[in-house]
Image: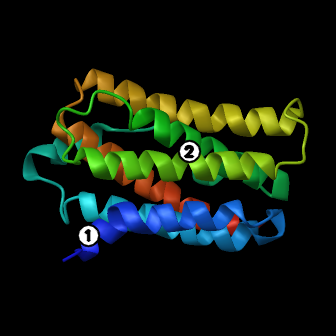
């Protein structure tokens, strides 16, 4: 019997990937909403319902260098670039030393495949020049935010607590993406 967990980890992201191949940029918002929801569900299914007691001190000590919520993404293209950069950077960070991360390999592969496909499809729908100063600034600020997550992981030697905090931050990014999708 196929479990619901298998479908969320493998089946749903693959269905969404196949579905988007046949869609064009006019359907981008609808597809991004579905794919982002699948990312959130997979992330939620792998995160603990509460932060382990031994991680509380790390939660209070973590302070990202950049707050993505303050990023100016008032233009549609800027919102697309922000989403695409978050997806790429999330993929990079989830390829780091994962020994203390409580994800199985199948779930990680599905997560990476979904992120990579979303990023590529979004990239194909970008119309602004990558040389635009505003686009570059948006991309730089998102990268700076994720660099602080990466630095935190390294500083904490990729501990379970560090991964818990990074997953919480990534979840916040996916919630932020939901708001950005409304701007597209």
Give the residue at mark 2. Answer: 116
Residue 82: image location, x then y, percent: 68, 47
Residue identifier under label 1: 5
What is the distance, in whole Å, between disc 2 and disc 1 at their CAs? Answer: 21 Å
Q: Secondary structure at mark 2?
A: helix
Visible in this render: residue 66?
no
Q: Is residue 173 above or below residue 136?
A: below
Asked if residue 181 is positioned above or below residue 164 in the image, the reply reads: below
Q: Is residue 39 visible?
A: yes
Q: What kind of element bears circle 1?
A: helix
Image point (62%, 68%), residue name: 19
Q: Quadrant of the C terminus?
A: bottom right
Horizontal side of residue 84 vs 17, given as left or right: right
Residue in the image at 45% along x and 45% along y = 112
Is residue 139 rendered to the left or right of residue 49? right
Near mark 1 (Cα within 10 A), the count class, few <14, some 14-19 or many ≥20, is few
Q: Residues within 10 Å of mark 2 (few under 14, many from 20)?
A: some
Q: Earlier in the sequence, mark 2 or mark 1?
A: 1
Residue 35: name its quadrant.
bottom right
Classify residue 134 as left or right of residue 142: right
Residue found 22% across the figure and 74% down from its top: 3
């Amino acid at each position: 019997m196929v479990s619901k967990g298998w479908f969320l980890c493998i089946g749903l992201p693959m269905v969404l990937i196949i579905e988007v191949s046949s869609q064009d940029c006019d359907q981008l918002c609808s597809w991004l909403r579905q794919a982002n929801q699948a990312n959130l569900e997979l992330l939620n299914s792998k995160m603990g319902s509460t932060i382990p007691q031994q991680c509380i001190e790390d939660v209070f000590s973590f302070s990202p260098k950049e707050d993505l919520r303050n990023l100016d993404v008032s233009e549609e293209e800027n919102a697309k670039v922000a989403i695409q950069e978050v997806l790429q950077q999330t993929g990079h960070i989830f390829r780091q030393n994962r020994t203390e991360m409580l994800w199985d390999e199948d779930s990680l592969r599905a997560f990476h495949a979904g992120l990579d496909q979303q990023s590529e499809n979004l990239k194909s729908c970008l119309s602004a020049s990558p040389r635009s100063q505003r686009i570059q600034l948006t991309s730089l600020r998102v990268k700076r935010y994720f660099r602080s997550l990466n630095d935190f992981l390294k500083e904490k030697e990729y501990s379970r607590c560090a991964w818990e905090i990074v997953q919480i931050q990534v979840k916040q990014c996916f919630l932020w993406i939901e708001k950005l999708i409304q701007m597209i």
